[in-house]
Image: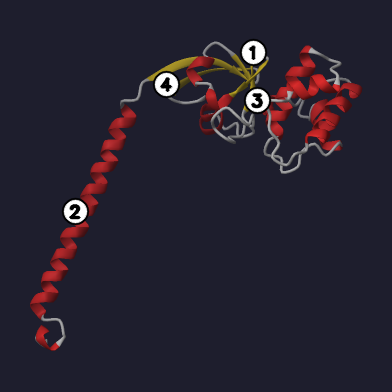
Amino acid sequence: MKDSTNGDLSRREFIGGTGAAIVAVNATTATAQDRDAAEARAIAEVPRTRIEITVNGQRQSVDVEDRWTLVELLRDHLGLTGTRIGCNRGECGACTVLIDDEPAYACSTLAVWADGRSIRTVEGVERDGKVSTLQQAFIEHNAPQCGFCTSGQLMSATALLERNPSPTAQEIREALSGNLCRCSNYNAIVEAVQAAVKMGGA
């Protein structure tokens, strides 16, 4: 092999460089392993609590991390993905569920706070395997646009119709004021709720 003074790599330089690369790879692997081990220890040290909740009529005993929000529990651990995560800071209402029949933002409710409570998600709105009257009215009146906010809108509207079977348009707007529709389809949503009233309620 030619000498490096001629612009080519010498055997000694090649071997030295290869050895340094191997050391660097090993160091990187060790660092990644240390990081993974540290993360595993941190997860193991997170406080956990066993809670008893009723979700869509089914009683469940669940072991939760104290830091989980209700939306994390529902989506990631119970598979109820109809509850959406929008802003994830209690502003848009996409994650609205009913807790003891009252609308609540699941993204800003800790799962441990739901202990002993009854939770209803959009999956629990259908009846006997069929969409509810309200869901059918949403379909017929084009209330969903992109559909992202729809489950939250449905849950707030369901709570409204269960406590007030004949709301005025203004009462509907007030009840849904905590649910944002980024498609600005508010008029169609209000019309759908009004249609559900005429069709027999929630």
In the image, what residue occupies the spot 53% across and 21% down? Answer: 109
The residue under label 4 is 66
Please report contact status of discs 4 and 3: CB closer than 8 Å, yes or no. no
As measured in the structure, the alpha-carbon distance from the residue carrying label 1 to the one carrying label 4 is 21 Å
Report the disc number at residue 100: 1
Question: Residue type at mark 1?
Answer: Asp
Q: Quadrant of residue 60?
A: top right
Mark 1 vs mark 2: which is more N-terminal?
Answer: 2
| Helix, strand or loop at mark 1 | loop
Which amino acid type corresponds to the residue marked 3 in the rendered image? Thr
Task: Categorize mark 1 by other alpha carbons within 10 Å: few (<14), some (14-19), many (20+).
Answer: some
Classed neighbour count for the residue bearing mark 4: other residues with Cα under 10 Å, few (<14), some (14–19), many (≥20): some
The residues tagged by marks 4 and 3 sit, at their Cα atoms, a distance apart of 21 Å
Q: 28 above or below 47? A: below
Q: Is residue 74 left or right of residue 124?
A: left
- Which residue is depicted at the point 50% across and 25% down? 69
Sequence-first disc among 4 and 2? 2
Work out how far the residue at label 1 is from the one at label 2, CA to CA, in angstroms: 54 Å
Q: Position of residue 119 (x, y in %)?
A: 62, 18
Report the Cα–Cα distance between label 3 and label 1: 11 Å
Are the residues at dot 1 and dot 4 in contact (C-beta closer than 8 Å)?
no
Q: Earlier in the sequence, mark 4 or mark 3?
A: 4
Q: Where is residue 92, by image quadrant?
A: top right
Residue corresponding to mark 2: 27
Q: Secondary structure at mark 2?
A: helix
Residue 90, position as x, y percentages in the image = 57, 27
Q: In what element is the residue under mark 4? A: loop
Could you tell me how far apart the alpha carbons at marks 2 and 3 are, in whole angstroms? Answer: 48 Å
Distance between the alpha carbons at the discs numbered 4 and 2 = 35 Å
Vertical relation: 89 (above or below) 7: above
Identify the residue under disc 3: 121
Going by the numbered disc 4, the residue's amino acid type is: Asp
